[in-house]
Amino acid sequence: MKVQEALAELRKEKGAKFDQTVELIINLRGIDVKKDQMNAVITLPHKVKDKKVCGFLTEKSKIVDSITEGQFAKYSDKKELKKLVDNYDYFLSVAKLMPKVATTFGKILGPAGKMPSPQLGILPQENEQSIKDTLDKINSSLKIRLKEASVKIAVGKQSMSDEKIAQNIDAVYHGVINALPKKKENLKNTMIKFTMTKPFKVEVE
């Protein structure tokens, strides 16, 4: 079934009383999750939602929640650290603070996949434009890490047009395939679903 046909079928299902998320499920084969590391950053043509972002900065910002260098000591408390990581989807940092960010927050941000990276979240300069550009990039990007032999990703909302959802699916599908060790050989099947529906198998070209 083509993506557009599957979306048409999904829209026929009894509607939920909220704007359902469109989920893409890429099931894999021949993958050893421990050996085959995959850390891909994929840019979506169409933003799905704004992410909650926090910045490690030298001074407070008006456009992003900020933790300044003087507040780092507070996070030697494990409870505070865990609360911080649970509260935000992404973190950004000004480049010169990265060594201290790694020392203070690395133990918990690293395993959670939320460490600021050169691809997504490290600011060369600390100014409003640089922060705004990085936030825009974060909001339209997905960071994918392989935790199991299946990749499940939110690629849209029910309220988005089929065309926009299909373009997001296409971007994520090809981004994941290109990041796999054996490319399409590692693909078992691809499915899409809404939050409350059963999945439909689809062929992505």
Image (cartoon, rainbow, N blue to C red):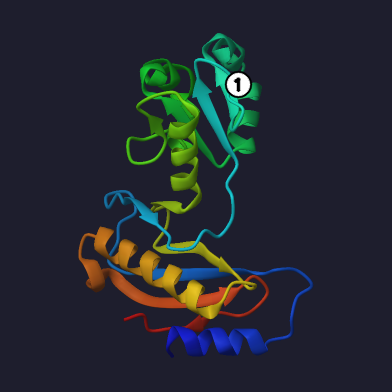
- Secondary element at tag 1: helix
Q: Mark 1: few, some, or many residues within 10 Å (few <14, many ≥20)? A: few
Q: Residue at x 36, y 23 (%)?
A: 95
Q: Nearer the viewer, residue 61 or 54?
A: 61
The residue tagged 1 is: 78
Where does residue 102 sit, x and y in percent of width and height?
41, 22
Q: Nearer the viewer, residue 197 or 52?
A: 52
Where does residue 175 sit, x and y in percent of width and height?
32, 62
Where does residue 122 sit, x and y in percent of width and height?
38, 31
Where does residue 159 sit, x and y in percent of width and height?
64, 72
Whether residue 67 appears in this view of the structure is yes
Q: Residue at x 53, y 79 (%)?
A: 162
Q: Is residue 184 left or right of residue 108?
A: left
Residue type, mark 1 in image: Lys
User: Measured along the vertical axis of the image, is residue 171 above or below residue 6?
Assistant: above
Q: Residue at x 46, y 33 (%)?
A: 129
Q: Quadrant of the N terminus?
A: bottom left
> Residue at the front extreme?
129
Quadrant in which residue 173 is drawn: bottom left
Q: Is residue 177 left or right of residue 91?
A: left
Q: Residue at x 59, y 20 (%)?
A: 60
